[in-house]
Amino acid sequence: MKPKLKKGLRLKEYVSQIIARLRKLYPGAHCELNFKNPLELLVATVLSAQCTDKRVNLVTADLFKRLKNAADYASIPQEELETAIKSTGFFRNKAKSIRSMANDLVHNFGGKVPGSMDELTSLAGVGRKTANVVLGNAFGINEGIVVDTHVRRLAQRLGLTRQIDPDKIELELMKIVPQDDWTNFSHWLIWHGRRCCYAQKPDCVHCDLASLCPSFEELSKLSRPMKSAITPRVMRRSVGRGAPKV
C-alpha cells in the first residue's frame, strides 16, 4: 500500500534530510557486486537478476578467472557458460544474453564497454537499469538512478513516489534528488533495505529514518521484536515530524 503523506516538511527539505541521514549512516555504501573493470560489472549485473549479490560474487570469483575479455564471453559455448552460472538462476537466458552482449561489444565497440547510456542500451540484453549500474559504478557517471526492488520499496514507503513502474519511479526520483547523489542514493536505499527496511518485517524501531518516514506508524506494527528493553532512540523522537507536502 502506498503511504499517505503526513503534514510536515517541504519536499526539498525532506529529501535533503533523508540524504543527510543516509549519508551519515552508510558512509561507505557501494555496489556490492565484485568487479575490477566495466566488463566484469556488466556481466555481474546481468547475473544479478533474481539473484543475490552474494551468490553472484561466488560465481564470478571463478568465472572472471576463466573469461578475461568480451571475445572470451562471445566465443564460450552456450552449454559451458550455462554450467558455470547455473546457480544464479535463469541460467539459460542469462548465458544467451551475456554471449549476445559480448558479441555486440566485439563487433560494434572493439571489445570495450562503452560509457554512454545510448551505447550501453544498444547492447543485447542491456536495459536502462543495468546501464545505470555500469555508468555510475564503473565510470562514475550519474546518468540516472538505479531502481531495484529495494529502491522501489523504500521510495514508496518514504513517500517519495506513488508510482509502481521502475522507469517512472526513476524519473520522479531524478527530479528531487541532486544529480551528484544519484548513484549513491541508490546505494543508500539498497543498503538500508538490506539492513533495516526489510520487505516483510522492517526493523522500524531501530530505523534512523523513523521520525521522517510517513509509513512508520503502519509498518512498525509489522516490525521485528525489540532486541533489548531499552527504549529505541527513534521512539523518543517528536511524532510531529513527517513527510512533506507535495
Image (cartoon, rainbow, N blue to C red):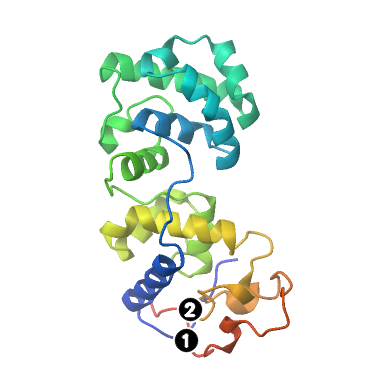
Identity of the residue drawn at 33% across and 78% down: 13
Instruction: Name above or below for residue 214 compared with residue 198.
Output: below
Report the side of 3 relative to 30 (left or right): right
Mark 1 residue element: loop
Tell me whether the residue at label 2 lies in contact with that at label 1, contact meaning CB atoms closer than 8 angstroms.
yes
Instruction: Name above or below for residue 119 compared with residue 175.
Output: above
Identity of the residue drawn at 43% across and 28% down: 125
Kindly identify which numbered label has been placed on residue 212: 2
Identity of the residue drawn at 58% across and 89% down: 236
Instruction: Name above or below for residue 99 compared with residue 167.
Output: above
Q: Nearer the viewer, residue 178 or 8?
A: 178
**Split into 4 quadrants, where in the image is the N terminus?**
bottom right
Lower sequence index among marks 2 and 1: 2
Mark 2 residue element: loop
Crowding around mark 2 (Cα neighbors within 10 Å: few <14, some 14 to 19, many 20+) is many
Identity of the residue drawn at 33% across and 45% down: 136
Give the percent coordinates (x, y) of residue 230: 68, 84
Crowding around mark 1 (Cα neighbors within 10 Å: few <14, some 14 to 19, many 20+) is some
Q: Is residue 114 visible?
A: yes
Give the percent coordinates (x, y) of residue 159: 47, 70
Give the percent coordinates (x, y) of residue 212: 48, 78
Q: Is residue 52 visible?
A: no
Would you name the residue on which mark 1 appears?
241
Instruction: Name above or below for residue 192 compared with residue 125.
Output: below
**Split into 4 quadrants, where in the image is the C terminus?**
bottom left
Give the percent coordinates (x, y) of residue 36: 38, 33
Cα distance in 3D space between marks 2 and 1: 6 Å
Q: Amino acid at mark 1?
A: Arg
